[in-house]
Amino acid sequence: MIAGQIKKMCATLGSPVEYTLPVNNELVGLNQYLGQHIKLSYLGNIQCSHCGKRTKKSYSQGFCYVCMTKLAQCDLCIMKPETCHYHLGTCREPEWGESHCFQDHYVYLANSSGLKVGITRHTQVPTRWIDQGATQALPVFKVKTRLQSGEIEMALKKYVADKTDWRKMLKGQAEAKDLLFERDRLLQEAQLEINQVIAANDDGQIQLLSHAKVVEIDYPVLEYPVKVSSLNFDKTPVIEGRLLGIKGQYLILDVGVLNIRKFTSYNIQFDG
């Protein structure tokens, strides 16, 4: 038994991915519980992951309302990087923006519930792909800022999805795709839009990763659900069942699936 504030699961690329659940300052290894009965009990307390104050409701996956309205990491431009407004002098936290948004980012293709385009900071590879439940991933561009990554993503999303169907992702392995072929096809289709983004930026800021290799990702799953039923601590404070697998940020139980990331900052008791 271990109890405390939880964060999204940590994942290490391996065969399969190795998952741990942060509970306060401890990491609970989850792969060892595959096939076993586990129990997670919500203790009725949520603490903001930034200021630590108690909050009745979690905003933006783990923050109180005040922090959600003030922190740059909770601003709309984090979800839509093409709307970055740092250059307008309106960034909520300019220093945070400089340290997080003005660093190398990747634009990538991934296969989770199907082919999609996405972006991530260079420090989040391959974590971002694992969090999305991707079984294949391929970096396509390396850029210098988050805004640039958003602009390239916008150019590509005219021709490919940018969202994951989480229910479909949790029902099984996505059909394998030739990501190198898909990359070349999309680059040709979006050539005009991509060239416009490149022309609007300084030379060398946007780099095509023509020699990048496809990353294959295997998840610790014994059995996928036929029907995906979502579990929620706010409705069911005690969630227990046999752990059938872990994929993305979801625990797959014989009674349903639980999105751990959604309940960041909740105080939980874990019994394995």
Image (tube, grey):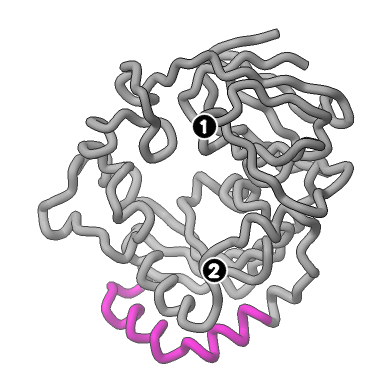
SS assignment at label 1: helix
Single out the mark in the foreground, 1 or 2: 1
Rendered location of residue 110, percent (x, y): 63, 64
Q: Which circle marks residue 263 in the picture?
A: 1
Main secondary structure along the magenta-highlighted residues: helix
Quadrant that contains the N terminus:
top right
**Residue drawn at x 80%, y 30% as measured from the top left:** 31
Query: Earlier along the polypeptide chain: callout 1 or callout 2?
Result: 2
In the rendered view, does 151 fall on the left or right side of 171? Answer: left
List the residue tagged with mark 2. 117
Kind of residue at badge 1: Phe
Q: Which circle marks residue 135 in the picture?
A: none
Q: Which of 255 and 175 is in front in this view?
A: 255
In the rendered view, does 76 fall on the left or right side of 93? Answer: right
Tell me the magenta residue range.
Answer: 182-203
Q: Residues within 10 Å of mark 1 (few under 14, many from 20)?
A: many
Quadrant that contains the C terminus:
top right
Rendered location of residue 89, percent (x, y): 10, 53
SS assignment at label 2: strand
Q: Magenta stretch containing residue 241, yes or no?
A: no
**Residue drawn at x 81%, y 32% as measured from the top left:** 243
Kind of residue at badge 2: Val
In the rendered view, does 43 fall on the left or right side of 97? Answer: right
Rendered location of residue 86, percent (x, y): 19, 55
Name the outermost residue toward the top.
1
In the rendered view, does 115 fall on the left or right side of 5? Answer: right
Q: Quadrant of residue 63?
A: top left
